[in-house]
């Protein structure tokens, strides 16, 4: 803002010196070579304007980058606090749209609109003061025209803000709609619904296009209103100065007009409205930022699990047990899944968690991992609160990305060395599989581990557990939906993991995993009993 104000003051000096040079040349008959002082001043004003323009843009970009970085950090904190269970009902496309597009929509507001709000007030006042000193009647014309522009812009801006909010909503819907169709493409092909899905995406995209065009129409209308009033005001000032210099007007200060004062006022008149022009030009940035802010201000109430009760991650004395005391947990609209559940698991112990489907095995694992917090009770992992230290989690379908074996291993352990990766893969029985790959660890995998069998994908996920410093490993049905051969491979990898000294809690029905466990805990009617 300060840089923009310096830029405006430099222009006032530039206009005054230019009017002075022309006046001395035309009226006084001085040669240009005799006007070294004003010429040096002109050059200095141009240099100051150039530096201030660069500084204004630079400072704006720095401020915007810091704000966007802070917003993304707050988004991460909010998502981490809610956990994957509470975010399960949110479209990943919508979250990605928030993370990228909606945060980026804040850029123009902080770079351009926010400082321009102040410049639209300070710069016209500075110019108005100079014009009032030169000719109070010309200043009066400018003063009358100035308030009309913000008034009509505000009326139009109300509509623009509503349209921008609708634009943000439609963008999120389109992203989620398209991603859902892409993910279900195989199913759509099998049922012959690709054409209908394409038509649905086209219809959604057309709705988005229509909202975008309505937003642009309002933006252009705002600019047209400003240009109309600014042009009329400048034309009135020019006519007054022209007739005043010709002697057709003898009212007020008109007889005292000179070529210097008249030219100086004419040069300043467009600049008087320029900050308002810039504000109108960036008004769309404000509308876009407000629409994005509505989406970013907070996620809706949780649909899966109770809201997290924030508490400081404890850093108390370490113990050798995982302890849960009198846990009670459930989901909105349902009775409590867990009722007064208490357990204790010693360090290095392998415990199987069994029970019928829907008995709360996954809910208990989520409580221990810190994904959800119970309505009542407490959990400590070796003396620490859930989330204070890393916990390894492996569900029925491991999360694998499109990339090489190295990319997938470093997804959770970014600093892992190649030697440690080979050791982890050997521990889970994937050494021969990697050796058979054409590019070794650099061999690319498809999204979701495409190119690997179900057992190989699970063992690759288990290899990541070897690479991270997590004492507790939580596994939710790791052998579900696997063929007998793949099951045997995963169980062998689990046996190797158990021998490594890590603490394992495995939700399972598989007899082989029950046999390898030190003991089993059974969930029945929301209560935990030793088997």
Image (tube, rainbow, N blue to C red):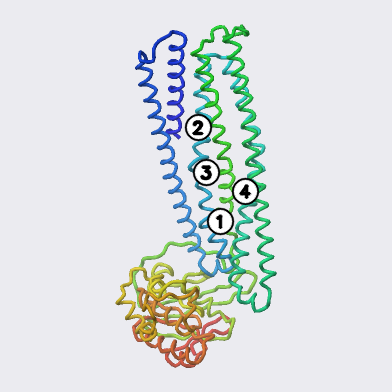
Q: CB under 8 Å between callouts 3 and 4? A: no
Q: Nearer the viewer, mark 1 or mark 2?
A: 2
User: According to the image, label 4 marks what residue?
Assistant: 164
Give the alpha-carbon distance from disc 2 to disc 4, as whole Å: 24 Å
Image quadrant in which the N terminus is located: top left
Question: In the image, 310: left or right of 163?
Answer: left
Which residue corresponds to the image point at 46% horizontal and 48% vertical from the top-left?
A: 67
Q: Which mark is residue 119?
A: 2
Q: Of label 1 and label 3, which has the lower sequence position?
A: 3
Separation of disc 4 and disc 1 at Cα?
Answer: 18 Å
Q: Is residue 266 left or right of residue 470?
A: right
Q: Are marks 1 and 3 in contact (CB under 8 Å)?
A: no
Residue on which disc 1 sits? 298
Answer with mark 2 or mark 3, whichever residue precedes in sequence: 3
Q: Quick one: label 4 or label 1, which is nearer the N terminus? A: 4
- Circle nearer the N terminus (2, 4): 2
Label 1, label 2: how many angstroms apart (C-alpha)?
32 Å
What numbered label is drawn on residue 109? 3
Question: Which is in the foreground here, disc 4 or disc 1?
Answer: 4
């Amino acid at each position: 803002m300060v840089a923009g104000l310096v830029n405006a003051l430099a222009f006032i000096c530039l206009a005054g010196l230019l009017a002075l040079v022309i006046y001395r040349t035309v009226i006084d008959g001085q040669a240009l070579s005799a006007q070294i002082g004003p010429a040096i001043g002109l050059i200095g004003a141009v240099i100051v304007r150039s530096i201030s323009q660069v500084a204004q843009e630079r400072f704006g970009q720095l401020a915007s980058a810091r704000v966007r970085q802070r917003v993304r950090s707050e988004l991460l904190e909010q998502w981490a606090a809610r956990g994957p269970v509470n975010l399960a009902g949110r479209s990943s496309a919508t979250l990605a749209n928030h993370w990228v597009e909606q945060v980026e929509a804040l850029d123009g507001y902080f770079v351009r609109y926010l400082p321009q709000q102040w410049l639209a007030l300070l710069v016209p006042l500075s110019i108005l003061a100079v014009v009032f000193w030169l000719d109070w009647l010309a200043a009066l014309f400018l003063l009358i025209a100035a308030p009309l522009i913000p008034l009509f812009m505000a009326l139009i801006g109300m509509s623009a803000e509503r349209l921008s909010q609708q634009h943000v909503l439609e963008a999120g819907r389109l992203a989620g709609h398209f991603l859902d169709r892409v993910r279900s493409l195989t199913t759509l092909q099998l049922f012959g619904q690709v054409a209908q899905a394409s038509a649905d995406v086209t219809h959604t995209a057309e709705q988005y296009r229509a909202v975008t065009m309505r937003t642009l129409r309002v933006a252009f209308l705002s600019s047209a209103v400003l240009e109309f009033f600014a042009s009329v005001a400048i034309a009135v000032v020019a006519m007054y100065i022209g007739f005043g210099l010709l002697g057709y007007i003898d009212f007020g200060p008109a007889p005292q007009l000179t070529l210097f004062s008249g030219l100086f006022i004419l040069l300043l008149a467009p600049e008087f409205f320029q900050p308002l022009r810039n504000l109108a030009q960036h008004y769309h940035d404000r509308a876009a930022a407000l629409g994005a802010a509505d989406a970013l201000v907070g996620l809706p109430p949780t649909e899966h699990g109770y809201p997290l009760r924030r508490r400081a991650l404890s850093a108390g004395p370490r113990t050798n047990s995982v302890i849960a005391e009198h846990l009670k947990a459930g989901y909105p609209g349902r009775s409590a899944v867990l009722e007064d559940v208490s357990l204790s698991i010693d360090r290095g112990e392998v415990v199987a968690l069994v029970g019928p489907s829907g008995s709360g095995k996954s809910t208990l694992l989520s409580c221990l991992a810190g994904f959800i917090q119970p309505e009542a009770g407490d959990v400590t992992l070796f003396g620490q609160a859930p989330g204070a230290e890393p916990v390894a989690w492996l569900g029925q379908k491991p999360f694998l990305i499109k990339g090489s074996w190295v990319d997938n291993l470093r997804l959770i352990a970014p600093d892992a060395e190649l030697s440690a990766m080979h050791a982890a893969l050997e521990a889970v029985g994937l050494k021969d599989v990697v050796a058979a790959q054409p590019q070794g660890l650099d061999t690319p995998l498809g999204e979701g581990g495409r190119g690997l069998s179900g057992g190989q994908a699970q063992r690759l996920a288990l290899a990541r557990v070897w690479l991270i410093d997590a004492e507790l490993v939580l596994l939710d049905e790791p052998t579900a939906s696997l063929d007998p051969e793949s099951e045997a491979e995963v169980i062998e990898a689990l046996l190797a993991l158990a021998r490594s000294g890590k603490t394992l809690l495995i939700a399972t029905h598989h007899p082989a995993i029950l046999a390898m466990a030190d003991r089993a805990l059974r969930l029945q009617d929301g209560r935990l009993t030793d088997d």
